[in-house]
Amino acid sequence: MMSSAWLIPLFPLLAFLILLAFGRQLKEASAYVGILATLAGFILALGAFFERFAAGAEDYYVAFKWLTLGDKVIDMGFEVTPINAMMLVIVTFVSMLVHIYSKGYMHGDDRFPVFYSYLALFTFSMLGLVISPNLLQVYIFWELVGVCSFLLVGFYFYKDEAKAAAKKAFIVTRVGDVGLFIGISLLFWYSGSFNYVDIFNAIQNGVMQPWQITLVGILIFIGAVGKSGQFPLHTWLPDAMEGPTPVSALIHAATMVAAGVYLVAAMYPLYLASPDASQVIAVIGGITAIFAASIGLTQRDIKRVLAYSTVSQLGYMMLALGTASVAGYVAGTFHLMTHAFFKALLFLAAGSVIHAAHTQDIFEMGGLYKKMKITGTVFLIGCLAISGIFPFAGFWSKEEILGAAYTSGHTGLFWMAVVAAFFTAFYMFRLFFVTFTGEPAQKNHAHESPAVMTFPMLLLAVLAIVAGFINTPGAPILGHWLTEGLRGVPAGEEHSAPFWITIVATGVSLMGIGLAYLMYGKKSVSRDIIAGPLPWLYQLSFRKYYIDEIYDVVFVRTLRAIGYFLNVVDYYIIDGVVRLVGAFTHELGNAEARVQSGQIQTYGLVAFLGIVLLVIGLTFVRGLVG
Amino acid sequence: MSVPLASYLLVALILFCVGLYGALTKRNAVVVLLSIELMLNAVNINFVAFAKFGVLANLTGQIFSLFSITLAAAEAAIGLAILISLYRNRSTVNVDEMDLMKR
Amino acid sequence: MDSMLLTLLTLSPLLGLVVLALIPRSQVSSIKLIGVLATVLPLILSFILYAGFSFNKAGLQFVEKHTWFAIPADQVSFPINYELGVDGLSMPLVLLASVIGFFAAIAGAVFLKKRWKEFYILFLLMEIGTIGCFTAQNLFLFFIFFEFTLIPMFFIMGIWGFVEREKAAMRFLIYNGVGSAIMLIVFVAIFMNVWTLNYTEITQALNAPNSPFNTPGSPGFVSEGLRTGMFVALLIAFAIKIPIAPLHTWMIKAYQESPAAAVLVSSGVMIKIGAYGLIRFNVGFFPEAATHMATFIGVLGVINIIYGAVLALVQKSLKLVLAYSSISHMGIILLGIAAMNTVGFQGAIFQMVSHGLVAALLFFIVSMIFERTGTADIAELGGLAKSMPFVGGIFLTAAMASAGLPGMSGFISEFTAFLGLFKVMPQIAAVGTIGIILTAVYLLRAVLGTTFGPTANRWLGLADAQPLEVIPMVLVLGLIVLIGVYPSVLSEPLQATLQNIVPRIGG
């Protein structure tokens, strides 16, 4: 099955081409094309996964010549390694569920086939990214997923907000992409190749200087920062919620935003060789985790809360990877997997709520549990999973992250992560209580979503409960398998995390849930307990630390001002000089034209006088007179 | 008896100056054309005079004067034709009003 | 008859020209048909050329050489030959010229409103010039073909343009006239020094170790200073054509006021002649001077990229956005050249072809919008994707190609050019990458401002693209995607030729 892994991305590509050509005729039947393609991909991906998972399996690599650059040949191809086999399964699975779910969610939309074609294109690109054996190919698909994200965020193109959000998503990630671009370009010349294997060989053989490794590592991480919405390039992700909700579940929760984490994980041998670059990742990850969580506390839009929680969780993953240890590597990728399940679940459930309530403001909902039992239950499961409550999936993976952070000596970051965990539990349950319990804020005719939407949610809910058992501290099956072939692992034994971390982590999560219950469930604690005495603190969080405003002034306005200034320079100085030369020549011509009276006799007279003068002059010069 | 070369040249000179004066000052285009004829004829006189009294006296001068006469006739014909068509269009033969190129 | 292929190709538009001359001007539809068909002939021939082109040979192929006339000087006389030939460097550009010629001929049929007969006659003359510039193998022929592109373009701009067409045409003519005058002076200077006009012979004379013109102390030695002087003069001449800021202002007016067909040819092919000349003459003849000036060219490239991009950001008119975007994209060609290595040159040539196709496509789309709405002002437009979904979609796709989206030609050219430069001048290249971000910013601003957002009522009834418009756009887009997905179609013919050029500059 591994040898046919290249087919996995091609199914969605085929679906995209079919929908592009016949979408208008297929109308809502387009959904089946997409679902079938992702189903086929999922089955193949499972096959490849299990084949790779079997004992004694080796990585599988195939490539063909794509482009000749002087004496260098650049290949395109695919490979199957533990981490990308895992990603293939996650991506095809979530994508398939989202394809099914969208059939209900997008029902009745004019551009239904277009939506499905974009989804298929995205799935193709994401799978292509995952399956790539070299950084150039990763970059190609990296950009393609960015464009698909842009297209889907801007799907409701007639809305000004969607237009602005799409633009922002594209441009902010583009900033990160440029970092990645510079990184892989330099890496190509330093190491002589784009291929993972060759690069890791070069690092192991000491071909690259330490400063080169660190520089390249940080540049590649900048790409990951943009894609995974890490601070300070996180601003696009919450805005991207303007897209249809299934898109948010697929792209902006489960797969594309995880691409940054995946890239860092895929380049792990490079980061293991550079403690400085790893430190940067850990710090950025830690800051992002707590920073985004603190914004999530006060947002009113159900999708935005989830978006900030995504940013925060991605920060966790980065923090884990930044510890530059085997435990961190396992924890980061493990959390990537569990997060894909429970966050996709939460988004789909949120979509179901929005579908029913026709609003995204949680304070306009309330009491939905009675009307939407399935949605409410799965949402609760998602909340428990993300809060890290035993035995849900998030418990195991978050546990490992905290453990990795602590044992690798990042004590400060560890405590930041603990506080972020408290915030996470609080805002997730705030969301749950406000949306599903209490009295309806306004009359609505909310009803449960159709089976085509609840079925994917139920499947994800099951995974959100059980996915964690694949890697428990007692039996780290996944971790063992993932790290088997990992190169560049520093010598020295790994410390296992002390048990009190589990207690602390679960404790703070329960405290968060409890506080949320008291404030929003039982309403025995005033909601204004913080916002009342410290309004600026509330505003700071609600306004997202004014980051958007700062960027607007520092970058957008400055750039535009430079643009207008240069426009003036271009018109008045550069073109001005040209026009001045033109005008001067023109005036000179005018002046001379005035001499030309058009009177032939005057010309004759002047010519005659000229001859006379010439003769007199010549006579004197030749000395014929005197 | 023979008239000296200087006399021929003097007559030609006077003739030429008269022609030049006329060509440069007269407003009537017909008179200007006539004046140009005068100047050409002054040249003819010089040709013939040099053909007889020149350093290398030969017939070339006389032949050239024949050319020149032919040319003058052609010129007068074309000039007058232009003048007539101009007169038909603009009902004037004044030289100072013929500045179409300038406009 | 293989040996006649290049002559046939270069002069093939003449056939259409003759037929057109025989058709009365009142038969508009047959004139349009003949005009478009006349450009299909060179298109087919150039694909035949590509098919017959051998990828492994480094030197010229399809060479034709006939003595034409001779210039007498000091007892000996110097023959001026008619010599054509293509190598890996000119091959892609010949293809580009014929593709764009076809595309622009359709643009003429779709968008022009008067005097089609005169237009197509001038247009076909211009096409001879553009193809000839790339097939010519000596300076004399090159100059003739170069002028052949200028004069018809002047008339096309001046007659079929918009409001300020005469001004724009004059400006175009004067700028480019100055450029070609400088070029002519250098060509004469080269001839007076090495007594030949053939590219290969000049390169040999100036660079071969045993050449008398390259041996200090020998009577014919061409000194370092003279070489640098000629290099700089040529650089200025081509800088006008490309254009390199601050010699770019002719282009702004020209893009704004010219008819679509003229801009397609100008942005698609003619400005590439400048870049081609830069590689063929500047780098080819004076490799040492080029190596010395590489950093300078790199800096110029970065300035062009960022200057063009920042200005494109604040333009009100779509046409001006595209004009400044062209300046920005030409900067990438300069970066590739500045790298002075195989990867960089490859990037530069990729970028010539890619930008030719993409810019032509973009301008075609903008012309469609302009024709339907009567404006190119971004603020006035908006929400066009609702009434013209196809146009909206292809506009976005073309913009993405221009912004260097992988899977399309823009990416591969941008990537290779930058990759080449990162090897030698990482700092300059890193500054240049700011342009990549800015490109995305101004293109999205322009495209989203036009097609996204709420639709004004008056734009609701616009007609989407017609078949005559769809077919060429899809064809060009197909080429863009083909190059993007499988760049070897372009890079393979280049390899052997570049192996020939690069060693001389020590890259």
Image (cartoon, rainbow, N blue to C red):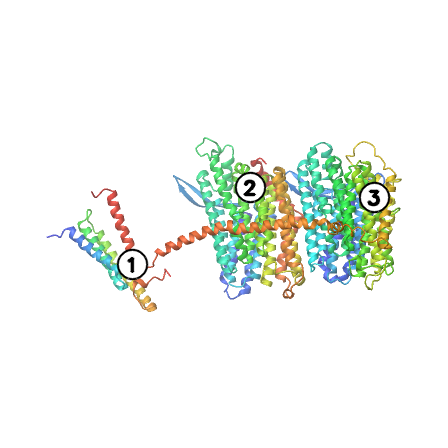
Disc 1/disc 2 C-alpha distance (Å): 58 Å
Front residue of this view, candidates C290 and C485: C290
Q: Which mark is nearer the camera, 3 or 1?
A: 3
Whole-percent x, y for residue C159 in the image: 49, 60
Question: Which residue corresponds to mark 1?
Answer: A601
A262 above or below C14? above
**Residue C12 appears in the figure:** no
Same chain letter for marks 1 and 2: no
Whole-percent x, y for residue C322 in the image: 59, 53
First of labels 3, 1 by sequence position: 3
Q: Which mark is nearer the camera, 3 or 2?
A: 3
Disc 3/disc 2 C-alpha distance (Å): 53 Å
> Going by the image, does C251 lie left or right of A405?
left
Question: Which residue corresponds to mark 3?
Answer: A398
Q: Residues within 10 Å of mark 1 (few under 14, many from 20)?
A: some
Disc 3/disc 1 C-alpha distance (Å): 104 Å
Whole-percent x, y for residue C447 in the image: 64, 56
